Image (cartoon, rainbow, N blue to C red):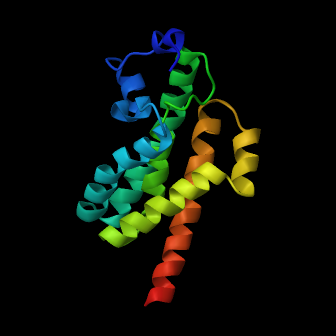
Amino acid sequence: MQPEIRQRISLTNPIHWLALGFGSGLAAKAPGTFGSLAALPIVWLSATYLPVTAYLILTLLMCLAGIYLCGKTADDMQVHDHGAIVWDEIAGMMCVFIAIPMSWDNLLIGFVLFRWLDIQKPLILGYIDRRFTGGLGIMLDDIVAGLIACGLLWGYLYIKT
């Protein structure tokens, strides 16, 4: 990260700390992947110990909060959707596992599906990424990628049984 941008953020600021995925977004390479990895314990614990309704509410709150967190941090950085902002990946990963049974193989498949969709941005995801700005623009393509990955994972689990 360029020093002048690094000076505009602080991990002691709770908004920046969350938007930067608890610091995972500061990884020198593949910050989105590190942000997605940071989401795994949250996903695992939430999906394992919360009822589906509570998981849905938590996911919705994370998505809505992310609009503000990511937008504010991007404004502070003076860069739209800087790679270090990874709360969108964390919220997107929560979307992947809505009502998905937790297992290591489901977690791995969901992670790979989400990362592929988030990186490649096929079809509607690329449109969303180009069309929307601000905090909503940062969050929306990852939320939709997470929901698509969830649908694909559900399809896989249906075919598998």
> For the view shown, which residue lies furthest in the bottom direction?
161
Q: Is residue 27 visible?
A: yes
Question: Considering depth in this image, is 95 or 81 the residue closer to the camera?
Answer: 81
Residue in the image at 59% along x and 51% along y: 118
Res 102 visible: no
Q: Residue 55 appears at what percent x and percent y? A: 36, 58
Residue 43 sits above or below residue 104 on the image: above
Image quadrant of residue 47?
bottom left
| Residue, far left | 49
**Residue sitting at x 45%, y 53%:** 93
Quarter-of-image position of residue 81: top right
Vertical comparison of 116 with 72: above or below: below
Q: Residue at x 75, y 58 (%)?
A: 123
Q: Is residue 20 left or right of residue 88?
A: left
Quarter of the image containing the C terminus?
A: bottom left
In this view, 123 is above or below 30: below
Q: Is residue 139 left or right of residue 69?
A: right
Foreground residue among 16 and 24: 24
Q: Is residue 86 above or below residue 144?
A: above
Q: Nearer the viewer, residue 125 or 119?
A: 119
* Left or right position of 137 against 83: right
- Label total for image: 0
Q: Position of residue 157 (x, y in %)?
A: 45, 81
> Residue 49: x and y, percent?
23, 61
Residue 4 position within the rendered picture, expressed as x and y whole percent measured from the top left: 53, 9
Residue at x-position 45% and y-position 30%: 28
